[in-house]
Amino acid sequence: MKHFIIALALAASAISIPNHSEAAQADPCQPIKNFFKSNAENKAGICRMHFTRTEPQVILKGYELSPDMVDLALNAHFQQTGNKAEVVGEFALLGEEVNPVADALRKGGIEITAIHNHLIGEQPTIYYLHFEGMGKINTLAKTVKAAVDKVSYQ
């Protein structure tokens, strides 16, 4: 019985129960949640942000398309790797929003990798701006947030 109690005590001491501060630090999306004041979905260590834009209404060949059909959104995926992080994403923008968003991203060191259309003939014309960057997660999140603030996502 004495050996059983000693073995049980040794086994119990080997179990580590994280406290709340350790659990919060373990959340790779916490810096993203802090900047965007929103939940970020954590999938395999990648923090996925998605904001669907409800305006403008997009018309194609006389039919109103839903925001989901047109992918009228901001998508940004953040991944922390060691001391560095990477962000890749896409904005759905109106023509007059392209330059202010591109300027905000470039100012923070994030590269524009593509600007193109997904549809032909939609009204208004929607441009999709793709971006990527590497650096400190807080700097990347702050830069993407500055770009988001240039657009009216509702």
Image (cartoon, grey):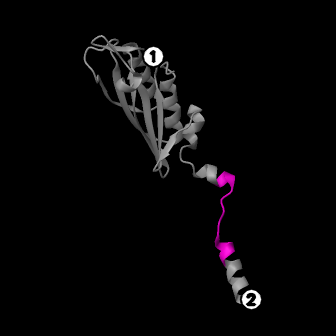
Residue 13 is inside the magenta segment = yes
Report the residue marked by disc 1.
55
Amino acid type shown at disc 1: Glu
* Element type where label 1 sits in the image: loop
Q: Nearer the viewer, residue 23 or 150?
A: 23
Which residue is disc 2 drawn over? Answer: 2
Q: Quadrant of residue 91?
A: top left
Label pair 1/2, CB-CB below 8 angstroms: no
Q: Which range of residues does the magenta coloring cover?
A: 11-22
If the image is split into quadrants, where does the N terminus sit? bottom right
Q: Secondary structure at mark 2?
A: helix
Q: Badge 2: how crowded within 10 Å, few (<14), some, or many (20+)?
A: few
Where does the image place residue 135, in percent across and percent down from the top left?
46, 41
Residue 123 appears left or right of 40: left
Q: Which quarter of the figure has residue 106?
A: top left
Q: Relative to 146, is 76 above or below?
A: below
